[in-house]
Amino acid sequence: MTQNLTDLLAQLESLGIASVRGHSARSTDGLRQFGVKLGDLRTIAKKIKSDHALALQLWDTDVLDARLLAILILKPQQLTVQQLESMVRDARGVQLADWLTSYVVKHHPENEAFREAWMNDADPWIARVGWALTSSRIAKDPSGLDLAALLDRLEATMATSPSEVQWTMNFCLANIGIHHERLRARAIDIGERLGIYRDYPVSKGCTSPFAPIWIREIVGRQ
């Protein structure tokens, strides 16, 4: 399905809902927002399928809804490394940063070249992406990672890290405990002593992000 940018932006604006805008207003970081429901964005993306050129145009609008749609229809492999890093540095807010990480960055063939640098970046939104990539490596391809050193770093810095990056650092801690039995007891101990997300509210049937509970729950299912 072929659409031009002007018509697509008009469609997105017509689907905007005030309550959706109000719900996520604090996480837009200055971007304009129409307030399109995520389900409606996915429906539009399914009709378009993929359109890399249109996706880049949508990203350049600085409209949150348009950027989320761009993420769903672009082709990660066609992004240059310069484009990839530019997008990561331009993605603010939980929804945008995490969608970009999950749907684009993790599927880009050169993401490993940036992973460590992003982990160490002073910008917490960029560091959030770097730690998310490291979390995936821990779970799926830990070869070459010094997991004990990562635990040392988590133990020393996680409690004082900004909340944006603390979230994906916690994923690393949990994944070390879940996937690496020899380090499980230490990961649980670090989680207990730091106490991060101990009292985090969760819906019935959902697993707590508090690492000791999370680790024991997942390991118990295996």
Image (cartoon, rainbow, N blue to C red):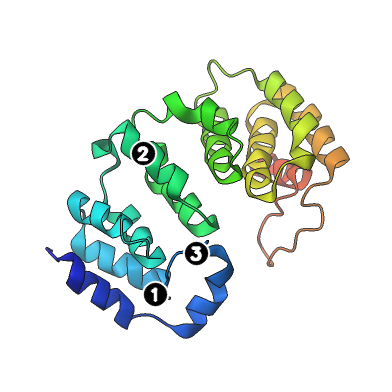
What kind of element bears circle 3?
Answer: loop
Residue behind mark 1: 36
What is the spatial separation of the Cα atoms under label 1 and label 2, in whole angstroms? Answer: 25 Å
Residue 113, horizontal then vertical, whole percent: 43, 24
Q: How many discs appear? A: 3
| Quadrant in the picture for residue 166 | top right
**Image point (41%, 31%), residue name:** 111
Question: Outermost residue toward the front?
Answer: 30
Residue 128, horizontal then vertical, whole percent: 57, 42
Q: Is residue 6 above or below residue 156?
A: below
Residue behind mark 3: 30
**Image point (50%, 58%), residue name:** 95
What kind of element bears circle 2?
Answer: helix
| Quadrant in the picture for residue 8 | bottom left
Residue 186, horizontal then vertical, whole percent: 80, 28
Disc 3 residue type (three-letter)? Gly
**Image point (41%, 64%), residue name:** 64
Badge 1 crowding class, 10 Å Cα cut-off, few under 14, some 14 to 19, many 20 or more, is many
Q: Is residue 159 above or below residue 2?
A: above
Mark 1 or 2 closer to N-term? 1
